[in-house]
Each structure stands twice: as structure tokens, then as C-alpha cells.
Image (cartoon, rainbow, N blue to C red):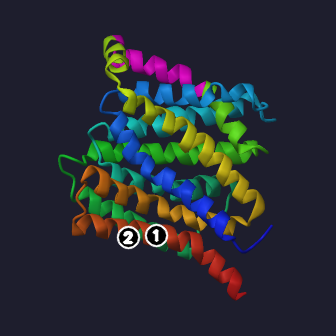
Amino acid sequence: MHPTLPLRHFLLALAVVAVWGTNFVVIKLALGHLPPLLFAALRFTIALLPAVFFLPRPAVPWRNLALYGLLIGVGQFGLLYVAMNGHISPGLASLVIQIQVFFTIALSMRLTGERVRPFQWFALLLAASGIGVIVLHTDGTTTLFGLFLILLAALSWAGGNMAAKQGAPANMLAYVVWSSAFAIPPLFALSFMIEGWDVAVAGVRQADLATWAAVAWQSWANTLFGYAAWGWLLARHPAATITPLALLIPVFGMGASALLLGEALPAWKLAAAGLVMAGLTLNLLWPRRRSIAA
């Protein structure tokens, strides 16, 4: 592995982070025509087909694939789409869902018996303070219900991370594609039960070319390109070199929401973002700093 990142590889990593960050704007645009649960079901259907015919099934138990598919498909993205359907702004959604980092740490420590280190407590306090600022400023664009759904989505994402860690797939792209098969049936079922058949049919009929392009972007750019490129980079460089770039996801998310959707960035929102980002940065980079000093 190469500790230094060539310019081409850096630009590839930046492209992935930009796709993942601006993805929240794409979600918001698609929700203008499609109900959220149906949108999620279509996203995973297109991620599955036809890619599943070209990628070998990962050498992990079926139950692990099912668990990952349910947690990521229904838990993370199903709840995320519902929350973004009028309950939270895209920029804040891109920021708050990064709390999954701390949920992942908590789940990992519960399973392994590790103790939380002092810097992690401080990092969590910073991030939680940022969430507190958002709670104090809920309004018509960001509600407590939306914030609660995003936190549940982040918890589901953390659970998916633990499932992937347990499965330890050699090919993460194939793992994501095959696990999509287990997200599709419950998402369609929930859509028909909660949103209704008539709403689903009307959404598909009213969806224009831009809406279908947004669904395809979710499946191909966000999932297939994103995971394939990220996995390729992690196979060639240390994780400590690549993973810090993920801190730019909410930067792209909030920036794109402000530029493309006109989402306001008042002082309180910037303060909340600063606190959450400070917590994420401390949690990610402090161990690396200590290892370099040693």
C-alpha cells in the first residue's frame, strides 16, 4: 500500500465524496415526484439489476446479506428518504447522519468489550452539542420528527457497518449489490401499505426524465461508482489516508444544498456544522496523530 496519495487517486476520492455529498440534493429533487419508500425501493432495484448478473455472490452467509440489506436499505435509506420528504433540509440531513460514526463506535465497543477513550468522549460531546443546536432551532424546514428519523437512519447505518464487518466481504461492491435483493421486498411492501397503491402509481406516472435520472444516479453513481471507487482506493492506500476525506461529505452536502436549492446557512446552522465536524475530525484524526507522535 502507498501512504502517499497520487493526484489522480486524490481526484478520484474527491469525486466519490462529491457524489456522496451532493447526493442529498438529488434525493430532494426525486422526492418532488416519488413517495419516499417507493423511491428507496426503485433505487435498490436498479442497483441490483442488472449488476447482480455480473458480480459473483459474496462468500458470506445469506443471513448476513439479509441483515445488511435490511439495515441499509430499509433502516438507513428508507428512513432518510422519509425524513427528507418535508421533515429536514438536505444540508442538515447530510450533516446529522454522520453521527453514525459514534453509533458505530458504541456498537463495536459493546460487542468487543472495549472502553471508550477520553478523546472519544470529548468528540462525542462536541458532535452532540451540534445536534443540540439543531434541536433548539427546529422550524418548518427541520422538525424534531425529521431529526429523530435521521438519527434512527444513522443508527441503522452503524448496524449495517457492524454487519459488514462481521461478514468481511472481499468485494464490497458485490456485497452491496447482492444485499440489495433483501431491501427491495420490504420497501415495496411498506410503500404499498403506508403510502398506498394509488400514490405509488401516481408517483411513477408523474415522474419526469429528471426524476428517473435522479433514481439512476442514486443507484449507479452513488452506489456502483461510489463503492467500487472507494473500495479500489482502500485496496491501494492505508485507510488512514483515505477515510479522512469522508469528512468532506457534509461540506459538499451543505454547500450543494445552499447553491442549488437555496438552503439558508444562518449562523446557528454553521455553528452546529462546526461542532459536529469538529467531533468527527477529532475522533478520526486523534488516533492517527498519536500514532505518528509515537
Question: Regarding mark 1 in the picture, which secondary structure is present there?
Answer: helix
In the image, farthest residue toward the bottom: 293
| Badge 2 element | helix
Residue at 35 percent of width and 45 percent of height: 148
Span shown in magenta: 182-197
Residue 133's spot in the image, x, y percent? 28, 63
Q: Quick check: 206 above or below 118?
A: above
Residue 195 part of the magenta-drawn span: yes
Residue visible at 45% across and 43% down in the picture? 153
Residue 166 on the magenta span: no
Residue closer to the observer: 173 or 132: 173
Type of amino acid under label 2: Leu
Bin the neighbour count of mark 2 within 10 Å (Cα to Cα): few under 14, some 14-19, many 20 and up.
Answer: many
Q: In this view of the protein, which residue sits in the foreground, 96 or 172?
A: 172
Residue ID for mark 1? 279
Q: Is residue 270 left or right of residue 163?
A: left
Label ID, residue 275: 2
Does 146 sit left or right of 292 as displayed?
left
From this viewpoint, is residue 111 visible?
Answer: no
Which quarter of the figure is the C terminus placed in?
A: bottom right
